């Protein structure tokens, strides 16, 4: 499991850029000032490039990798968790890439309705567990982001 990783809230979608250990990791100095960009940004990613002004507020969410759970798919379409299910996990994904569910039950229901169970057949499969936070506001101050509220989590 890895530590907390951050992403600008308005970039959260089906595909997201490489995440940073700290919101300030997205700040890039340019000839004309500062920009908010992913660390691996290229010009084809226009939506992930925006100017920053002193005092500007940017919302960020963080994720935590909560490990994995092994799930056994049965021939009758049922399933069961073989290993303990990590606590407080909001989203589930098949590793390395795959559908998301708000809970393990939601993901299993989605996979049944999409025919995924039929494609992979019975057996044990590893599922990744993640937690995504709500948005926290940060103020751009110099070359860093400063939390707007005292109780904002950091790394």
Image: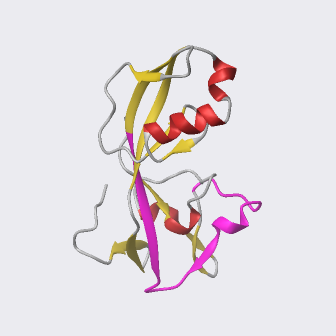
Residue 99 in the magenta stretch? The answer is no
Where does the image place residue 30, in percent across and percent down from the top left? 61, 74
In the image, is 100 to the left or to the right of 69?
A: right
In the image, is 27 to the left or to the right of 14?
A: left
Q: Which color scheme did the rendering employ for the protein?
A: secondary structure
Where does the image place residue 139, in percent across and percent down from the top left? 40, 79
| Residue at the (47%, 75%) spot, across then down | 58
Specify the quadrant that holds the C terminus: bottom left
Which of the two residues, 128 or 54, is positioned nearer the viewer here? 128
Q: Most extreme residue toward the left, as rendered?
A: 150
Specify the quadrant that holds the N terminus: top left
| Residue at the (56%, 50%) spot, across then down | 18
Q: Most extreme residue toward the front, as rendered?
A: 76
Looking at the rendering, the stretch of residues picked out in magenta corresponds to: 39-65
Q: Give above or below for 32 relative to 134.
A: below
Residue 44 in the magenta stretch? The answer is yes
Where does the image place residue 25, in percent across and percent down from the top left? 47, 60
Q: How many marks?
A: 0
| Residue at the (68%, 30%) spot, across then down | 115
Q: Give above or below for 120 relative to 93.
A: above
Where does the image place residue 52, in percent across and percent down from the top left? 54, 80
């Amino acid at each position: 499991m890895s530590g907390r990783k951050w992403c600008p809230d308005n970039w959260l979608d089906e595909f997201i850029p490489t995440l940073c250990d700290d919101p300030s990791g997205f700040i890039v100095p340019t000839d004309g000032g500062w920009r908010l960009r992913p660390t691996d940004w290229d010009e084809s990613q226009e939506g992930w490039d925006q100017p920053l002004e002193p005092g500007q507020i940017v919302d960020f969410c963080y994720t935590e990798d909560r490990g994995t759970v092994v799930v056994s798919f049965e021939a009758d379409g049922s399933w069961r968790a073989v290993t303990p299910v990590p606590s407080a996990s909001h989203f589930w994904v098949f590793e390395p890439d795959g559908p998301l569910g708000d809970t393990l039950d939601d993901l299993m229901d989605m996979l049944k309705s999409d025919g995924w169970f039929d494609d992979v057949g019975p057996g044990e499969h590893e599922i990744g567990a993640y937690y995504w936070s709500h948005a926290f506001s940060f103020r751009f101050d110099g070359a860093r982001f400063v939390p707007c509220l005292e109780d904002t989590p950091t790394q």
